[in-house]
Structures are given as structure tokens and as C-alpha cells.
Amino acid sequence: MSKDSLLKQASNISQFFFLIKSNIVVPKSFSFSYLKYRILRPVLKGYYKLFNLFYPGRPWTTPASILFFERALTKDMIGIEYGSGRSTMFFAKKLKKLISIEHYPGWYEKVKKELENKGVHNVDYFLILKQDTPDAIEDIDTELDKLEGSELRNDFANYYNKVNEYSNGYFDFVLIDGRARVKCGLNAMNKLKSGGIFVLDNSERKRYAPLRNALKDWPMVNTTTGLTNTTIWIKP
């Protein structure tokens, strides 16, 4: 499928599945915008829960993004996800191979057991723990650290550098949905092939601005639940 076709498909799906056209979350105040947010919030949450009833076992991304994944991902693709869970089983069924990276031991064991019980063999699943000793940390970009705040901590260097073990252009699909998302995403950009799909969940968060800025020249489609966004880029 061509880059233009992927973008058109994502755009068409997102237009159909938007209840509203943008994220409505606003800080607490006495404004009309905040009142609208408080009124719509339970409605949007209910809609998302209803979608999950009809589409069980899907990633915790927007409904539009999930339908895009259903159509765009194929069995000749290799993908990587930062942050495991329901998405791991979902993408394992869609892709030829999936690299999945998790930082939390308890969650890792739960997902690993599910993969084993269901006989899934096309997932390379890695537990990469938070580091305890600053001496073991690789070089950190101080300016990015300031911009992203606590998400880009030195003790996650081994985690966000895992993608650097793969050659440039190795992946067809990248999902950033775990810890230290800016650094994970920046590292993954060169590892995605031309025409590949790059996804950032919760992309509305201000602390991910450095990553959004780095991707500003890539064609993109933004999808939303009204409360949180999932943005899809296609690499030029």
C-alpha cells in the first residue's frame, strides 16, 4: 500500500470515528470550555467502553487508530512497540514479527505467560528494567531532559536505547506507548523504513513536543477519543 493510500485510509477512518474533531481536555477553571469538558467527559468515556465491547482485545489507542491498524498492517511487516499489553497479542496476529519492550516485571510476566499459553512465537519480548546506578547511564541530551521532564530519566537509558540494536530501515511499524517516549521515538525514527507507520499514543501531552517537532515534516493524521489522542505518521 502506498504512502498516500495509507494516509487517505487513516484520514477517512478518523473522520468517521471522531465524535468531535479535537481533544477537549482543559485545565480546571470557571470557563465554558471546562464546563463542556466536564459534560462530555462521561459521554466520551462511555463511547470508548462501548467500542471495546465490540472490539475486545485491542490496543488502548483510539478507535480510529485501531481500525487503521486492522486495514494497514500485514503479515509481511516487522514492528516494534514500546509498552506491552493487549497490543502485543493484537500486533502479533497482524505482523510477521514483533519486538515488544516492557519495563515493569509484573506486567511482563503476565503478558509473557499469555503469549506462551496461546502459542505465539513471532514476538521477541524484552524486559528492560529501570537502572539503579547513574554510572551505568549512557549520554543524555540535557535539553530534551528539560523539555520532557521526569519521563526522560537517566535510569531508562537501556530501555530507550534497545531499538538502536536494529539496523536503519529495519521496521515497517513503530508504536511508542511506554516510558521515556520522546527518546524512544527519536531513536526509532531512523529504524523505520520509508513508507513505514509511526504511532505515538497520548500524543496530546505537552511533554512530547520534542518528538512531535522532530516529526513535523512527516505526513500525519491525528485521531482522538476527545480525551486522548493517537497520532499516526507515515515516513517520507
Image (cartoon, grey):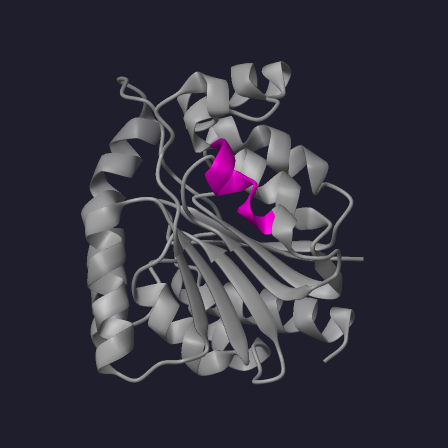
The C terminus lies in quadrant: bottom right
Nearer-the-camera pick, 182 or 119:
119
Nearer-the-camera pick, 234 or 21:
234
**Figure disc tally:** 0
The N terminus lies in quadrant: bottom right
In the picture, measured across the screen, residue 112 lies left or right of residue 178, that is left
Residue interval drawn in magenta: 157-163
Q: Is residue 19 above or below residue 181?
A: below
Residue at horizontal 69 percent and vertical 54 percent from the top: 191
Residue at horizontal 39 percent and vertical 58 percent from the top: 61
- Picture quarter containing residue 74? bottom right
Residue at horizontal 35 percent and vertical 73 percent from the top: 89
Was residue 176 drawn as part of the magenta stretch in this picture?
A: no
Q: Position of residue 51 (x, y in %)?
A: 27, 70
Is residue 170 in sight in this rendering? yes
Q: Is residue 24 above or below residue 196?
A: above
In the picture, measured across the screen, residue 116 lies left or right of residue 178, that is left
Nearer-the-camera pick, 161 or 65:
161
Is residue 68 in sight in this rendering? no
Q: Position of residue 49 (x, y in %)?
A: 21, 63
Residue at horizontal 64 percent and vertical 40 percent from the top: 186
In the picture, measured across the screen, residue 42 lies left or right of residue 222, that is left
Q: Is residue 172 above or below residue 73?
A: above
Q: Position of residue 38 (x, y in %)?
A: 22, 36
Tell me the chief SS of the magenta region. Answer: helix
